[in-house]
Amino acid sequence: MIASVDVKRMSDEELVRLYVDKQSNRYFELLYSRYSDKVYRKCLMFTKDPVKAEDFTHDIFLRLIMRLGSFKEQSRFSTWLFSITYNYCTDQMRTNRKKAEVAMDDDLEVLDDSPDEDLVEMEAQRLKSALGYLTIEEQSLLLMKYQDEVSIKEIADIHNLSESAVKMRLKRAKEKLKKRYLETLIFLTLLLAKLIAWTKLNK
């Protein structure tokens, strides 16, 4: 029998092979303990809802346990799992995705009540807000490439695209993200100008 300490040191791919061969839950439980939080955080990023994110995570691991036998080690296990995660989230969110709307009037009213706190929060949320204006597919591509460090070839294989098509889609997604990020920055600058004017008027 394999010692517990040895099992914990095994690679993901070794654990998959052992699970497929022996059908022992201990190997799957180790994979779950390594990746459940990471999958949950990715789901939460899409859903913005902790309960939905937990449901998505549960469903993804149910799918995973049914599909482990089809893992061919053509990519890292983490890449394969995250592709399942992104595809599942994309499918679930595509039909009911709502784009966030910037309610300028409401923001200005809150700014008058508590200017410093709002500016700090808006600065922290700027990139996240910009990302929210991309399609689910664009978000997935960017996150796979720049957060999970999945190679262009692996992304192409996962999405059944050519490498040149992946590069083009990434380029377009980055351009849209940059444009929205700069628009948000301009909006913040206008708010700063309003704050300065408001401060002068109330001295």
Image (tube, rainbow, N blue to C red):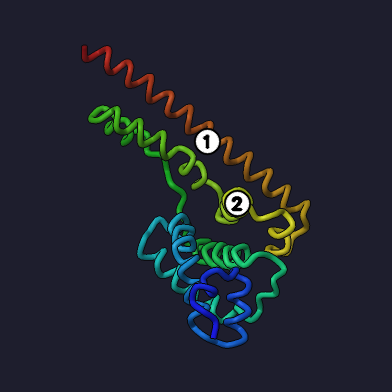
Q: Decide: few, some or many residues near mark 2? Use Cα within 10 Å; few <14, some 14-19, many ≥20.
A: many
Find numbered disc 2 in the image and state the secondary structure of the residue it sits on: helix
Q: Is residue 101 left or right of residue 70?
A: left
Relative depth, front residue between 140 and 14 = 14
Q: Is residue 12 left or right of residue 41?
A: right
Please state which amino acid type lies under the numbered disc 2.
Glu
Which residue is disc 1 drawn over? Answer: 181
Residue 28 visible from this viewpoint: yes
Residue 172 x %, y %: 67, 44
Alpha-carbon distance for marks 1 and 2? 15 Å
Q: Is residue 107 left or right of residue 124?
A: left
Relative depth, front residue between 187 and 37 = 37
Q: Is residue 9 above or below residue 17?
A: above
Q: Quadrant of the N terminus?
A: bottom right
Find numbered disc 1 in the image and state the secondary structure of the residue it sits on: helix
Which residue is disc 2 drawn over? Answer: 138
Residue 188 x %, y %: 42, 28
Residue 100 x %, y %: 43, 47
Which badge, 1 or 2, comes first in the chain's sequence? 2
Q: Is residue 35 above or below residue 145?
A: below
